[in-house]
């Protein structure tokens, strides 16, 4: 603790306690930055930087030396004014939800703290100039940086109430199945599904009880508008699976479920399936779910004959992008209309 020197001749890692030690080491860190420093801090970070001269002035000094500063924080209604001021003294600010604590990494040093408190100087930090620790810290920052969104976009969301659009890629089949289940449960108006093959429908029924989830949505009024959910499904016919067999799978069986005839009729009227000529889908291998015309999920089919979903399911994409959702909704409606013409 007594040797808080400006330079070290050997690699060192240490945990520093107390405001004086923590702040002094932070100032030394910033004063030694030559090329640039990358930082992330939770929603309390901006207030600490802007309210205390030792941080704000050192940030400005780093910039005067020609070094780059990139920072990630969680921008909220409470700290937005600090973030607007922060944008003026650093190169780039980005937003990421749910950050905890903070890190700082330069070309030669790394620091981190587990907690930040609004308007309060740091009281505990971990410091290291070990090469491997610095590399790990930079990797952590880069990972978060790539997930973060520009500060101006987040500020616009807060001030103008703009919906944030996203497109996510999911590689884990189990996570994809959980997402499908959750998004179906969240539906309030309509669910539209395109299956690339009839066997794909059977796989989803077997692995996530898809049809059971859909029937439950029909029978339970939406809390949003007190209406029953409408469900439309498009699936190709095959030589091995005829309409009669498919209808037995899809239509409601009242026996043993305690449903009145009126309920069964109502459920079936809200659950519609149409059969596509396989040529209408071309080489399509995507299972597509469109929820309330607000979200779209596409699941790549690699090989539906394989017994494990890890082999059968490829990449899954999930998006609320208006352009993306409307494009898939348009494709669905075109195919749906095509089945009417065929009939």
Image (spheres, helix red, strand yellow):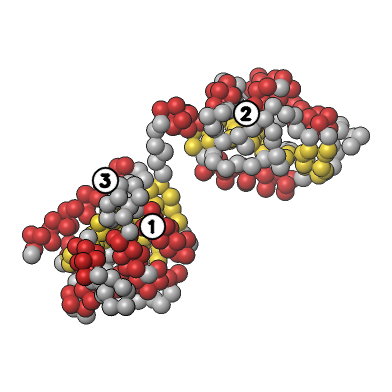
| Mark positioned earlier in the residue sequence (3 or 2) | 2
| Mark positioned earlier in the residue sequence (3 or 1) | 1
Where, by quadrant of the figure, is residue 11 drawn? top right
- Seen at 22% across and 55% down, the residue is 332
> Percent from the top left, x then y, of residue 99?
60, 41
Q: CA distance from mark 3 to mark 1?
A: 21 Å
Secondary structure beneath dot 3 equals helix
Residue assigned mark 2:
46
Q: Nearer the viewer, mark 3 or mark 1?
A: 1
Q: Are marks 3 and 1 in contact (CB under 8 Å)?
A: no
> Percent from the top left, x then y, of residue 125?
77, 39
Considering every residue shown, the one lying at the far right of the view is 2
Q: Are marks 3 and 2 in contact (CB under 8 Å)?
A: no
Q: Is residue 287 visible?
A: no
Residue assigned mark 1:
185
In the picture, the quarter occupied by the N terminus is: top right
> Position of 35 compared to 338: left or right?
right
Q: CA distance from mark 3 to mark 2?
A: 38 Å
Considering every residue shown, the one lying at the far bottom of the view is 240
- Seen at 92% across and 34% down, the residue is 2
Q: Is residue 37 visible?
A: yes
Secondary structure beneath dot 2 equals helix
| Mark positioned earlier in the residue sequence (1 or 2) | 2
> Percent from the top left, x then y, of residue 250?
25, 71
In the picture, the quarter occupied by the C terminus is: bottom left
Q: Are marks 1 and 2 in contact (CB under 8 Å)?
A: no
* Crowd rating for badge 2 (residues with CA inside 10 Å; few <14, some 14–19, many 20+): many
Q: Up-down: is 170 above or below 310? A: above
Q: Up-down: is 244 above or below 232? A: below
Q: CA distance from mark 1 to mark 2?
A: 38 Å
- Seen at 40% across and 47% down, the residue is 167
Residue assigned mark 3:
326
């Amino acid at each position: 603790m007594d040797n808080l020197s400006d330079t070290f001749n050997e690699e060192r890692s240490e945990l520093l306690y107390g405001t004086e030690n923590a702040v002094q080491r932070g100032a030394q860190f910033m004063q030694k930055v030559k090329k640039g420093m990358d930082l992330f801090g939770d929603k309390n970070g901006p207030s600490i930087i802007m309210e205390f001269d030792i941080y704000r002035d050192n940030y400005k000094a780093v910039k005067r030396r020609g070094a780059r500063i990139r920072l990630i924080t969680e921008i909220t209604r409470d700290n937005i004014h600090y973030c607007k001021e922060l944008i003026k003294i650093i190169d780039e600010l980005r937003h990421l939800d749910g950050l905890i604590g903070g890190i700082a990494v330069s070309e030669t040093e790394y620091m981190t703290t587990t907690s930040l408190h609004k308007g309060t100087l740091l009281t505990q930090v971990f410091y290291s100039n070990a090469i491997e620790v610095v590399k790990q810290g930079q990797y952590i920052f880069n990972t978060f940086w790539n997930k973060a969104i520009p500060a101006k976009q987040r500020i616009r969301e807060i001030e103008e109430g703009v919906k944030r659009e996203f497109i996510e890629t999911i590689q884990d089949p189990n996570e994809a199945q959980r997402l499908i289940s959750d998004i179906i449960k969240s539906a309030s108006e309509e669910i539209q599904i395109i299956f690339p093959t009839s066997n794909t429908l059977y796989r989803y029924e077997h692995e996530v009880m898809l049809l059971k989830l859909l029937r439950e949505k029909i029978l339970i009024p939406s809390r949003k508008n007190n209406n029953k959910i409408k469900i439309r499904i498009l699936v190709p016919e095959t030589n091995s699976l005829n309409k009669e067999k498919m209808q037995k799978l899809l239509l409601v069986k009242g026996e043993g479920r305690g449903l009145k005839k009126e309920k069964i009729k109502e459920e079936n009227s809200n659950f519609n399936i149409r059969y596509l000529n396989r040529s209408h889908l071309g080489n399509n291998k995507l299972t597509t779910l469109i929820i309330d015309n607000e979200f779209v999920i596409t699941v790549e089919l690699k090989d539906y004959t394989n017994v494990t979903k890890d082999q059968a399911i490829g990449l899954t994409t999930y998006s609320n992008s208006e352009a993306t959702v409307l494009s898939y909704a348009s494709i669905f409606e075109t195919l749906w209309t095509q089945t009417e013409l065929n009939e």
